[in-house]
Amino acid sequence: MIREVPAEGNNCIICLEPVGDSLSYHTMVCPVCQHAWFHWACVQQLALSAGMNYFDCPGCRDYSGFSEEMYIMGIHIPRRDPEWDSYEAQEPLQERHSR
């Protein structure tokens, strides 16, 4: 269990906003690298966007330790492909310019 509190001036590496200087339910740290701090809501949005296969720490890119600990901490990780890998996301890239 990690009991470290964020140093003053630490920012969430997802939204780049300050995480505060106290450990709380809304403040999380990567259990692997222990220097990447997040807001709970930012990690949840990342999990919803990435899906199970691509949900890893944005700081150290660890997959197994990070996703397992985030699941234990209450982050919902959907079992699906990432949002950016859908046909709807790729369709505008297939269009050709008329000039």
Image: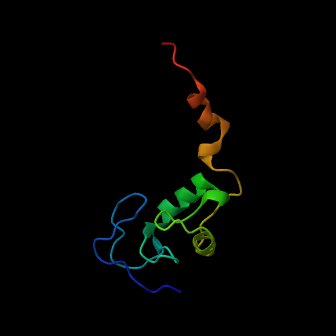
The image quadrant of residue 13 is: bottom left
Image point 36% across, 59% down: which residue? 16
Q: Between residues 45 and 95, which one lies in front from this camera angle?
A: 95
Q: Is residue 36 above or below residue 42?
A: below
From the viewer's perspective, tell me whether residue 9 is left or right of residue 41: left
What number of labels is visible?
0
Residue 55 x, y percent position in the rendering? 59, 61
Q: How is the structure coloured here?
A: rainbow
Residue furthest to the left: 9
From the viewer's perspective, tell me whether residue 22 is left or right of residue 62: left
Residue 4 x, y percent position in the rendering? 41, 84
The image quadrant of residue 17 is: bottom left
Q: Is residue 81 above or below residue 34?
A: above
Residue furthest to the top: 99
Residue furthest to the right: 79
Residue 39 x, y percent position in the rendering? 44, 66
Image point 48% across, 74% down: which residue? 25
Residue 31 x, y percent position in the rendering? 52, 77
Image point 49% across, 73% down: which residue? 30
The image quadrant of residue 94 is: top right
